[in-house]
Image (cartoon, rainbow, N blue to C red):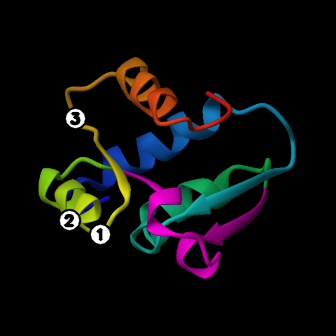
Amino acid sequence: MSSLFTVAEIDLARLGLAVLAGDELDVVVGGLGLGYTARAVLADPRVRSMHVVEALGVEPAEVVFVDDVLANVRGAQAAGVNAVHFALTDTYGSLRWRLQALGVPGL
């Protein structure tokens, strides 16, 4: 997520974690998510580990990228990544629906 919207980045990370059950979570972030997203993830005491997607050796089509900047979403799509535009006016429910449509588990 763009560093222009750090509050939204933190809130989105917290929302994503809030719906997850369990006490030992393994979380994956993108390289650009190593800023405020990673800080929010690591602040959750349930997080056991955090992995950077680029280090996992997965194909772009196996990744889902969420960002509030449309240009970043289009760039990810051009690279073959499943990308979702999450505008500041969108609801968590709409994001959840779009992620479910992409087959993201656990939602």
Magenta segment: 48-65
Residue identifier under label 1: 79
16 to 73, vertically: above or below: above
User: Who is closer to the viewer here, 33 or 106?
Assistant: 106
- Mark 3, secondary structure of its residue: loop
Viewer-nearest of discs 1 and 3: 1
Q: Find out whether the residues at labels 2 and 1 contact each other: C-beta distance under 8 Å.
A: yes
Name which residue type carries label 3. Answer: Leu
Label disc, if present, on residue 103 of the rendered structure: none
- Mark 2, secondary structure of its residue: helix
Residue identifier under label 3: 88
Q: Position of residue 50 (x, y in %)?
A: 69, 66
Name which residue type carries label 1. Answer: Ala
Are there few (<14), some (14-19), or many (20+) residues within 10 Å of tag 2?
few
Question: Label 2 to label 1, Cα distance in Å?
Answer: 6 Å
Label disc, if present, on residue 75 of the rendered structure: 2
Question: Label 1 to label 3, Cα distance in Å?
Answer: 24 Å
Are there few (<14), some (14-19), or many (20+) residues within 10 Å of tag 3?
few
First in residue order: circle 1 vs circle 3: 1
Question: Label 3 to label 2, Cα distance in Å?
Answer: 19 Å
